[in-house]
Image (cartoon, grey):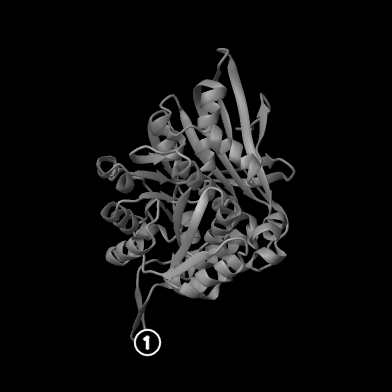
């Protein structure tokens, strides 16, 4: 049905490419490309049912990307590379003439800044080219936006309060490790917090606001208010929202390591000189920390991610609603060789690509996931390994 080119060869890509190969009725031709071709070859070698092509590409180089697109002729480019590279890849898609999907918004290399404005600015160009760009199609952002759209379509006349809750209750049995690219992960969780209330964005100190929240099958976990990019698009697309927040769990040992890393300057993203060589401390740190893609084998426990929503239901009465998924790290590893955090991001990326290639999420322009019909996506979540559960009028604690 369609040719898909995946850029990036980390843990998320490993899951996405393997799940793409499991749905060969939709994805007729598959290529994975990265700066390091050997990583792509490793992913391809694990897939036996279909042939996966591999290539080397520098995703910062637009002309190199265009040359690769000309050689493979994809119907869709799935960007699972670094968020610094989003705009280069979007530029290449426009130059060649192919649609685009990613899982994380663009970030400048030299500043931990999370906003969609840089990518939203491409809307007219994608519209005029007749191409679709689907932004933020992982779990959060991604499934959380689809959950919100599903709630709005089926259960709410007005959404007033939205709390996205993200718990990783897993144990990788390492002293310290990040569940995805350390460079991106540490930038994200050490930034200032921010939430939306009554038409304004309110900034907080990192991890200043926290409280225990109870997660299904897990129990109470201390949860910290941080800023996450999907809040920006959700309050824009659902203007009845009065308050929107994002909560994430962190263990005390993780926070202690994080504090030490910051205090000794290893979280810095600006270059320094060492023995006459320019290095970026956080990039050096990435090189010495465990590879997130290697954590799956001994990972135990599960993740729980969902949306807790309060507002006016279709019957005109106040309604509380909680929709969530729990994902076992061990089950994810048995299926794909990756841990649950990679799985919960890679599977939705594959489903988003499926939505595009089957014509269900296909319209010229640049869109966040909640701007499409959530129903076919929600149906595929149940089929592809991320089943969801609903709780009506329960205690959402927030």
Residue 43's quadrant in the figure? bottom right
Q: In this view, does 243 lie above or below 39?
A: above
The spot of residue 326 in percent (x, y) is 67, 45
Packing grade of label 1 (10 A; few <14, some 14-19, many >=20) is: few
Residue at position x 52%, y 25% in the image: 153
Q: Quadrant location of the C terminus? A: top right
Q: Could you tell whether 60 is left or right of 267 in the image?
A: left
Q: Which of 129 and 189 is in front in this view?
A: 129
Q: Residue 231, relative to residue 98: is it above or below? A: above
Rendered view: 257 above or below 273: above
Residue 197 percent coordinates (x, y): 44, 32
At which x and y percent is residue 379?
Answer: 60, 36
Q: Is residue 103 visible?
A: no
Task: Pick the residue in front: 370 or 20.
Answer: 20
Which of the 4 quarters of the picture holds residue 15?
bottom right
Residue at 58% in and 65% down = 292
Q: Is mark 1 on a helix, strand or loop?
A: loop
Q: Position of residue 256 (x, y in %)?
A: 59, 62
At 40% from the left and 31% from the top, the residue drawn is: 237
User: In this view, which residue lies farthest toward the top?
Assistant: 316
Q: Mark 1 sits on what residue?
A: 275
- The front one of 237 and 73 is 73
Report whether residue 76 is seen.
yes
Q: How many marks?
A: 1
> Residue sitting at 61 percent across and 67 percent down?
46
Q: Nearer the viewer, residue 3 or 318?
A: 3
Apparent side of residue 221 relative to residue 231 in the rendered image (left or right): right
């Amino acid at each position: 049905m369609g040719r898909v080119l995946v850029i990036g060869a980390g843990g998320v890509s490993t899951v996405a490419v393997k799940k793409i190969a499991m749905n060969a009725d939709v994805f007729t031709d598959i290529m994975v490309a990265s700066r390091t071709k050997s990583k792509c070859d490793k992913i391809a070698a694990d897939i036996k049912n279909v042939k996966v092509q591999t290539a080397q590409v520098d995703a910062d180089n637009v002309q190199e990307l265009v040359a690769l697109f000309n050689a493979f002729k994809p119907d869709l480019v799935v960007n699972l590379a670094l968020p610094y590279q989003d705009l280069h890849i979007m530029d290449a898609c426009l130059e060649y003439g192919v649609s685009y999907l990613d899982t994380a918004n663009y970030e400048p290399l030299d500043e931990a800044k999370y906003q969609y404005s840089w990518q939203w600015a491409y809307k007219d160009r994608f519209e005029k080219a007749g191409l679709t760009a689907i932004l933020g199609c992982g779990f959060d952002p991604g499934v959380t936006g689809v959950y919100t759209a599903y709630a709005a379509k089926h259960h709410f006349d007005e959404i007033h309060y939205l709390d996205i809750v993200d718990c990783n209750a897993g144990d990788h049995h390492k002293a310290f490790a990040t569940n995805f690219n350390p460079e991106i992960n540490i930038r994200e969780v050490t930034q200032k917090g921010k939430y939306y209330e009554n038409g304004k964005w309110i900034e907080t100190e990192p991890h200043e606001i926290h409280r225990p929240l109870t997660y299904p099958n897990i129990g109470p976990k201390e949860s910290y208010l941080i800023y996450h990019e999907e809040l920006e698009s959700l309050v824009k697309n659902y203007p009845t929202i009065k308050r929107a927040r994002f909560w994430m769990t962190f263990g005390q040992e993780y926070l202690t390591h994080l504090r030490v890393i910051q205090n000794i300057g290893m979280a810095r993203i600006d270059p320094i000189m060492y023995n006459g060589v320019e290095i970026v401390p956080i990039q050096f740190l990435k090189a010495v920390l465990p590879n997130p893609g290697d954590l799956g084998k001994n990972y135990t426990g599960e993740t729980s991610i969902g949306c807790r929503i309060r507002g006016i239901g279709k019957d005109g009465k106040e309604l509380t609603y909680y929709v969530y998924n729990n994902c076992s790290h061990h089950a994810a590893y048995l299926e794909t060789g990756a841990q649950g955090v990679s799985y919960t991001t890679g599977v939705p990326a594959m489903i988003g690509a499926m939505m595009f290639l089957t014509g269900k999420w296909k319209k010229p322009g640049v869109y966040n996931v909640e701007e499409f019909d959530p129903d076919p996506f929600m149906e595929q979540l149940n089929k592809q390994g991320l089943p969801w559960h609903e709780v009506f009028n329960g205690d959402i604690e927030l």
